[in-house]
Amino acid sequence: MQTMLSIKIDKKLKKKAHEVAHALGVSLNAVINQNIKEFVDVRQVTFTDHPMPNKKTQKLLDRLLADSKANRNFVGPFDTAEEMIKSLRS
């Protein structure tokens, strides 16, 4: 037997949750049911967040990765800490 659960949720949050569920190949209903089952079974709520860089940070990371692959825009290696500090101050 099933029943309907009605909750209030921010419209943008619902849209984002639906998009993530779709990307994972599951329905938002399945995500919510699984979370409720886990909550009942373990009597615990766990909140986690896997950081996703924003567009600006992702662009910077892409540029740094390209530089790394092309072996450019690097300094060092340094033989001593003093050499490193001198490089940082120049």
Image (cartoon, rainbow, N blue to C red):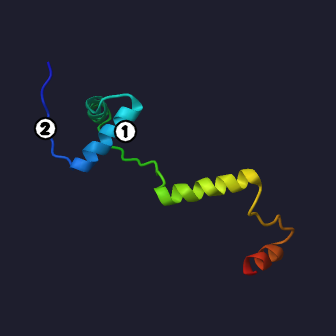
Within the image, what quadrant is residue 25 found in? top left
Instruction: Name the residue at 46% across, 48% down.
Output: 50
Instruction: Name the residue at 76% across, 80% down.
Output: 90
Local secondary structure at mark 2:
loop
Q: Nearer the viewer, residue 39 or 83?
A: 83
All told, the count of numbered labels is 2
Q: Earlier in the sequence, mark 2 or mark 1?
A: 2
> What type is the residue that disc 1 sits on?
Val
Within the image, what quadrant is residue 29 found in? top left
Left or right side of 25 for 75: right
Whole-percent x, y for residue 41 in the image: 30, 31
Crowd around label 1: few <14 · some 14–19 · many ≥20 (10 Å): some
Q: CA distance from mark 2 to mark 1?
A: 21 Å
Residue 75 lies, with reference to residue 55, above or below; the image says: below
Q: Nearer the viewer, residue 85 or 27?
A: 27
Q: Is residue 44 visible from the viewing direction of this image? A: no
Local secondary structure at mark 1:
helix
Q: Which label number is shown at residue 6? A: 2
> What type is the residue that disc 2 sits on?
Ser
Quadrant of the rendering where the N terminus is positioned: top left
Whole-percent x, y for residue 23 in the image: 40, 34
Whole-percent x, y for residue 17 in the image: 31, 41
What residue sits right under mark 1 in the picture?
A: 20
Crowd around label 2: few <14 · some 14–19 · many ≥20 (10 Å): few
